[in-house]
Amino acid sequence: MKRARVIGDGNLAWTLSAGLAQEGFQMGGDAGAVLALVVVLDHGRLIPMSLVEGGIAAWRERFDLTLAAARRDIEAARASLAGEGAIAVLVPVEGMTGAAGLTAYLAAVEGVRALVKSLGQAWAADGVRINCIALEAHVLHNDPNALRRVAIPLAAQLLSAGHPLSGTTLVAGGGVMAP
């Protein structure tokens, strides 16, 4: 039985849980029994602001807290694995391309991608694979139908036993971004 756990909350986590269940995953379970996980990066707000607007407090909210929350979720995912398994981290693709007014948030997203690359190498010897799935931000935040159509099947593939990739970013909707 394939088991998965979505770490996160709100509509995005619910949509991912329901979609993975439709892909044949048993959702939830006690810590230690989870074999495959999805970590949801949904901690930033998509409200544009200039680099200096709001000062250090605004930067801290967007950058530091987003990166810290993602790290916490990845650590929780790793702790939930019973031996070998996989973690998929959903991130907005705009982290790779940039977007006006989202500097701090997207810098944090790129920090998460760098963390996933490093952890992919560090955890490979333990049989733990971790990868990013990059989607357009509007899909992550506002488009559950596109999430079901694009991200969930890709997450199901990455979370399947024996999938060889680790430490990479797959761009949903086309292409692979290697580390």
Image: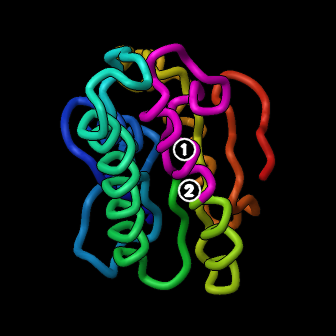
34 is higher (above) or lower (below) than 10: below
Asked whether 72 falls inside the magenta stretch, the response is no
Name the side, left or right, on which 44 lies relative to 162.
left
- The residue carrying mark 1 is 155
Residue toward you, 100 or 121: 100
For label 2, the crowd category at 10 Å Cα-Cα, with few meaning under 14, some 14 to 19 and many 20 or more, is many
Query: Disc 1 on helix, strand or loop?
Result: helix
Residue at (65, 78) in percent of width and height: 122
The residue type indicated by label 1 comes to Ala
Residue at (66, 24) in percent of width and height: 97
The image shows residue 79 at horizontal and vertical percentages of 36, 78
- The residue carrying mark 2 is 159
The image shows residue 20 at horizontal and vertical percentages of 41, 43
Asked whether 99 falls inside the magenta stretch, the response is yes
The image shows residue 167 at horizontal and vertical percentages of 69, 60
The residue type indicated by label 2 comes to Leu
Q: Which mark is residue 67?
A: none
User: Of helix, strand and loop, which mostly describes the magenta segment?
Assistant: helix
Q: Which image quarter is the N terminus in?
A: bottom left
Residue at (40, 52) in percent of width and height: 67
Instruction: Determine contact: label 2, label 1, CB under 8 Å.
Output: yes
Q: Identify the magenta region.
A: 89-114
Name the side, left or right, on which 107 lies relative to 176.
left
147 is higher (above) or lower (below) than 90: above
* Extreme residue toward the left, this view: 10
Residue at (52, 51) in percent of width and height: 112
